[in-house]
Image (tube, grey):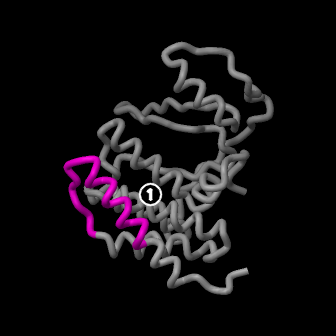
Amino acid sequence: NHPTWKMGQRITIDSATLMNKGFEVIEACWLFGFAPKDVEVVVHPQSSVHAMVEYSDGSVIAQVCATDMRMPIQYALTWPDREDAPVPRIDWQEARHWDFYPPDFARFPLLRLAYQAQEAGDSSGCTLNAADEIAVGAFLREQIPFTAIAEVVAETLSRVSGRFPRSIEEVLEIDRESRASALECVQQRATVHV
C-alpha cells in the first residue's frame, strides 16, 4: 500500500523499494552531519508523520501533515514563515492510531545499500543514484523485472570503485561510469520480460 499519494514514476518506484528512504538517510547525514547509524528509518503506513527528531532528553518532535507533498514543498519555500496551505487538514477525530515498523532490510535491500553507500563516505552515493535511475528506467520500460532493480544497483556498486572526487568534473565522470556499468547490468538481465 505504499506509496499513499500520487507521485512521478521514478519516485513511485523508489517509494515501493524504500530507495526514497535511503536517499533521505543520505540527505539527513549530509545536511545535519549525522552518522548513518544515527538516522533511523521506520515504515509508517499512514504517511502522516513525515519526520521525527528525538532529543537528548528522549522527547520527540514530529512533522505531521496530510499526505500531500505540496505542504513540505511550501514550507521549504516559505520558511521561516508559515502560509496557508492548499491541502486538507488532519482530522484528529479520525486519526486514531499510527503504526511504525522497522524496515525489513531483506525485503528492501536498496535501503541497506543506501546506508552502506553513506557509510563508505566516498563516491558510492553518486553510483547508487546513477544505478537506481538506470534500473528504475529499465523496469518502467519493462526491460527488467521489479526484483532486478536492487540486483542492478548492487552489482553496479560492486563494479564501480568508490573514490573521493575533488572536482565536479570527477563527480560527473563517476556518474557517467556508473550509468554505463548499470546499463551493462541491465542488458545482462534483459529478458523477454512481459
Q: Which residue is at the front of the view, 114 or 166?
A: 166
Quarter of the C terminus within the rendering = bottom right
Residue at the location (55% across, 70% down)? Answer: 107
Density class for disc 1 (Cα within 10 Å; few <14, some 14-19, many ≥20) is some
Q: Which residue is at the front of the view, 54 or 4?
A: 4
Q: Is residue 183 magenta?
A: no
Q: Is residue 171 magenta?
A: yes
In the rendered view, would you say 69 is above or below 139? Answer: above
Q: Which residue is at the front of the view, 17 or 62?
A: 17
**Residue 39 seen:** yes
In the rendered view, would you say 111 is above or below 139? Answer: above
Bounds of the magenta segment? 161-181
Residue 13 percent coordinates (x, y): 62, 59
Q: Amino acid at mark 1?
A: Asn
**Residue 92 seen:** no
Q: Report the residue marked by disc 1.
A: 129
